[in-house]
Image (cartoon, rainbow, N blue to C red):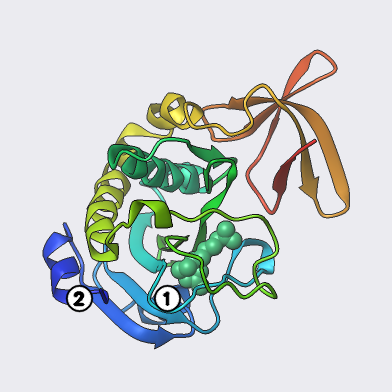
Amino acid sequence: MKLNQLDLQAALLCGEAVIFDEIDSTNEYLLCEYKHLAVGSVCAAEHQTAGRGRRGRSWYSGKNQNLCFSLLWRYSADEVHQISALSLVVALVLAESFTELGISDIQIKWPNDVYYQGKKLGGILIESRFENNDYYLVIGIGLNLSMDQVDLNVVNQPYADLSAYHLERNQLLQRIVPQLQKNLKIYPLVGFENYVERWQSYDLFYGKPVKLLAGDTEIHGISKGINDKGELLLEQAGKINAYAIGEMSLRAQ
Ligand code: BTN
């Protein structure tokens, strides 16, 4: 079934729903339109021709089968102190939504990749603009629901999908988006501390040897979860060191 703008609109706690058959990137749309749209607005598309991933990569989104959407939010600079940890909260909301649907074996790979049975199921790309003391955040989410026509030029890592569950995309979107809106609303009030334990219950690599890739540098250690800033904790030579969220990638050693 195609995505339905009215059904999504009815589910939103705030903002408006905009759905396209085809667009370059839902993130790009909201980055262009954020001045004209209310906080909480969602842009979803059946197909993206230039979907963006983290670290300058492309994001594959086949036609009418996965979920690609972006959500607009705004915080004043005084209101929120841990914007960098927000992507971990978004990953947690996704993971908990899947768990509530009865899907087990969901994990999160630090900082914000959602995994299913040890393979990537979805990703999050947050882009922002800062204007008049306000952060405008565009929270882009791509979820693999059915990956039967994959473009292997774009997808270059093992991936999972949820085709075994026959999820209806409209229902999934209507479940996830209000949960995201609710958590974005309370985030400045409760802070990231409120999410640490729940995030860690999904940690893909807890207790395992990992390497952190940052440019040409490889940092090795045993993964020990996260601290209350969302930083990665690695045990190295008997000491625990924290690594800030940035343009890094975490792998099994
Ligand atoms: C990642 O690299 O893991 C992040 C992928 C984020 C993809 C989503 S799809 C919807 C939104 N629009 C984009 O262009 N990118 C994000």
In the image, 100 versus 139, the foreground residue is 100
Quadrant including the C terminus: top right
Q: Residues within 10 Å of mark 1 (few under 14, many from 20)?
A: many
Ligand 1 contact, mark 1 (Cβ < 8 Å): yes
For residue 37, what is the image quadrant? Answer: bottom left
Task: State which tag comes first along the sequence, 2 or 1.
Answer: 2
Q: Name the residue: 62% across, 75% down.
A: 151
Which is more foreground, mark 2 or mark 1? 2
Residue type, label 2: Gln
Quadrant including the N terminus: bottom left
Q: Is residue 27 above or below residue 71?
A: below
Q: Name the residue: 28% across, 57% down.
A: 172
Q: State whether residue 222 appears in this view.
A: yes
Counting from the top left corner in percent of width and height, residue 159 is at 59, 55
Question: Which residue in the rendered view is the most extreme toward the top?
Answer: 238
In the image, 93 versus 81, the foreground residue is 93
Counting from the top left corner in percent of width and height, residue 146 is at 45, 64
Q: Could you give the CA–CA distance between mark 2 and mark 1, rounded to whole angstroms?
A: 14 Å
Q: Secondary structure at mark 2?
A: helix
Q: Is residue 138 above or below residue 211?
A: below
Counting from the top left corner in percent of width and height, residue 139 is at 43, 61
Residue 220: which numbered mark, if any?
A: none
Q: Which residue is mark 2?
A: 5
Q: Which residue is mark 1?
A: 26
Q: Is residue 71 above or below residue 213?
A: below
Q: Name the residue: 42% across, 67% down.
A: 66
Counting from the top left corner in percent of width and height, residue 3 is at 26, 74
Q: Residues within 10 Å of mark 2 (few under 14, many from 20)?
A: some
